[in-house]
Image: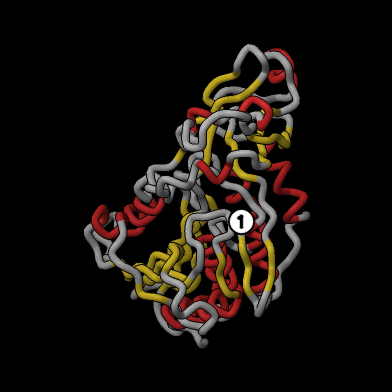
Amino acid sequence: MRWPGSVAALACVCGAAAPLRAQDTDGLVLRLAAMTAVTGFEDAMADSVRALLAGSVSDRAGNVVWRSGSGEPVRVAVCPLDEVGYVVGAVTGEGYLTLRRVGATAMGPLFDQFIEGQRVTVFGRRGAVPAVVGVRSTHLQRGRPAGADEPFSLDAAYVDVGASSPAEVAALGVELLAPVARAKRPHRYGDGLVAAPFAAQRAACAALLVAALRLRDGPAAGTAVAVFARRGHFAHDGAGFALAELTGAGAAAPSVVLLGGAAGPDSLGGGAVVDAADSVLVRRRRMAVAAWALPSRYARTPVETVALRDADALARRVVAFWGGAR
């Protein structure tokens, strides 16, 4: 299902398929970090990546796939496009929206609490709708003992889109199952650091894009493949489909590396890439899959932080993995 609102919202970020310089890792990290792609609603993100990467195509599962070279060995680098987010679960009689979380990845007990009182974007069929998640009235809380209420949970989230009835919500183009995500404002600070929700994953996908742009003459031998996969937070469903296509008809098993994730902060900014633990994709496909993660701080928070030099190091490592010059 496509959501025109999300496409329109991202058009202002991406522009009209502006060409990228092969070395522009910094700008691309910031560009992708500003985008939203709730699991199952990755159309706009996929469209943007395909427009930025000449020669890429969409497969039957909607993944964006790019190839260079031919023959064996086949080396595949995969990066998930999506993020854990929300969809509209219901519309109250007063015009508020309730939420349901989307994405099977465990995000920890604080993930939902981070949206209390925060700006969110609802991607309706008529465009992106700015909204805010309500908070408890400070006036009504006076005199109540500390700790009397349970911590904020998703069941307590009511989203205000400026409507006072279901009819007004519908007039905004907002329907049930419309994707909802925290409003994105990537922040660059310090010595080449970037903070944003899912910053490590977005920076990894930016590195994969840059690596493809740098591999101008193709690999020294074999085939290089980049897969920008959908539904990464749903057991790597999209990546699983892409790998099944690559290994069909008796083809030899490719070498696969899964990018993204959020490793520990110890080596943040050192230009290093962390070899991560086995992923769901490894267990699902029963093939040798390496997992490379960018170092990060404050993982799975709204200020998840990565270093731009680490993203560039990941791009160089992917180029080397494909058999190209660093």
Residue drawn at 37 percent across, 50 percent down: 236
Instruction: Give how far across and how far down residue 7 sits, in percent.
Output: 68, 42
Q: Residue at x 50, y 46 (%)?
A: 62
Q: Position of residue 210 (x, y in %)?
A: 59, 72
Q: For mark 1, what is the residue?
A: 50
**In the orientation shown, which residue stands out farthest toward the bottom?**
325
Judge from the rendering whether residue 271 lies leftward or rightward of residue 92; answer left or right.
left
Numbered circles on residues, count: 1
Task: Name the side, left or right, on which 245 lies relative to 86.
Answer: left
Specify the amino acid type for callout 1. Answer: Arg
72 relative to 98 in the view: left or right: left
| Residue 115 horizontal side relative to residue 166, left or right | left
Q: Does 294 appear above or below 157?
A: below
Task: Give the x, y percent position of residue 218.
Answer: 52, 78
**What is the quadrant of the N terminus in the image?**
top right
Residue at 67% x, 76% y: name it.
Answer: 190
Label 1 crowd (10 A; few <14 / some 14-19 / many >=20): many
Q: Does any portion of residue 219 appear in the rendered image?
A: no
Mark 1: which secondary structure?
Answer: helix
- Residue 91 visible to an observer of this rendering: yes
Depicted 217 relative to depicted 305: above or below: below
Residue 172's quadrant in the figure?
top right
Coloured how?
Answer: secondary structure
Q: Position of residue 250 (x, y in %)?
A: 24, 59
Q: Is residue 149 above or below residue 35?
A: above
Front position in the image: 300 or 40: 300
